[in-house]
Image: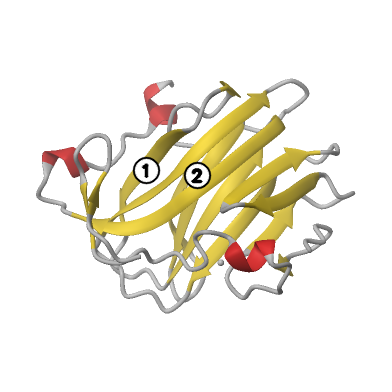
Amino acid sequence: MLALASAVLLASCDVADDKDGCSKLGENYLQDADFALEQQDQCSKHWVGLQHAGETSFEFTFEDGELSMKKIGTQPWGVLRQKLRNSDLGGARMAFAADIKLDLSGEGVGAFPVGGGLALTARSGRNRILLHSALNHKPRLGKTKWQMVQVIVDIPRNTKVIDLSFLHQASGVMQIRNPSFHRVDASSAACAVTPDLFAAAT
């Protein structure tokens, strides 16, 4: 089980197209993408739960291949993260995607950006942040049905570690299923890098 006062260990190779026609190439780099090890209540080496310091404020549950993240306290954010170490993906165009279902509001949340969904950080071997993307998709708030969200990025060439996270930075419940992290065809217009939605809003 997750003990969120600190980081605690909690984890398909088909070519597929997303709803916009961007081809996903080769393997899914995420491990335990169906959360099977978590549902078995094993100590998974793949997933880590984190939250802002303070009382336990996020409840993580796993059932039938789905992750549910529910805010139950006052701390502003919680994540479920998988870290890809010694990555050879520098220079690759990658798509981080998942099906999400939201019942989230920004009420009582001071952090920015407010919402729930995907976050990605690429780091150098010296732990310098080279790329950071958080909730750069829609929807990220409100009450929704299941739908796929995706963020496409170019991984910096000297990247050694990639953090792939589900970020809950709101009030309410977020559900995740079918997460994936794939190479995509950089020559395809359908696989263009996702624009920075927050930069566009300023």
Q: Residue at x 26, y 42 (%)?
A: 193
Other-residue count near label 1 (Cα within 10 Å), few / some / many at <14 / 14–19 / ≥20: many
Q: Is residue 80 left or right of residue 118?
A: right
Q: Amino acid at mark 2?
A: Leu
Camera-nearest residue between 20 and 138: 20
Reply above or below: 107 against 3.
Answer: above
Q: Is residue 58 left or right of residue 128?
A: right
**What label does residue 1 carry, if any?**
none
Q: Of callouts 2 and 1, which one flags the residue occurring earlier in the amino acid sequence?
A: 2
Other-residue count near label 2 (Cα within 10 Å), few / some / many at <14 / 14–19 / ≥20: many
Q: Secondary structure at mark 2?
A: strand
**CB under 8 Å between discs 2 and 1:** yes
Where residue 16 appears, as percent x and y from the top left, is 24, 51
Where residue 93 appears, as percent x and y from the top left, is 25, 56
Reply above or below: 155 against 111.
Answer: below
Q: Is residue 190 left or right of residue 45?
A: left
Q: Amino acid at mark 1?
A: Val
Camera-nearest residue between 145 and 137: 145
Where residue 25 appears, as percent x and y from the top left, is 22, 60
Q: Which residue is mark 2?
A: 118
Q: Is residue 151 left or right of residue 64?
A: left
Q: Which residue is mark 1?
A: 151
Reply above or below: 48 against 78.
Answer: below
Camera-nearest residue between 18 and 135: 18
Q: Quadrant of the C terminus?
A: top left
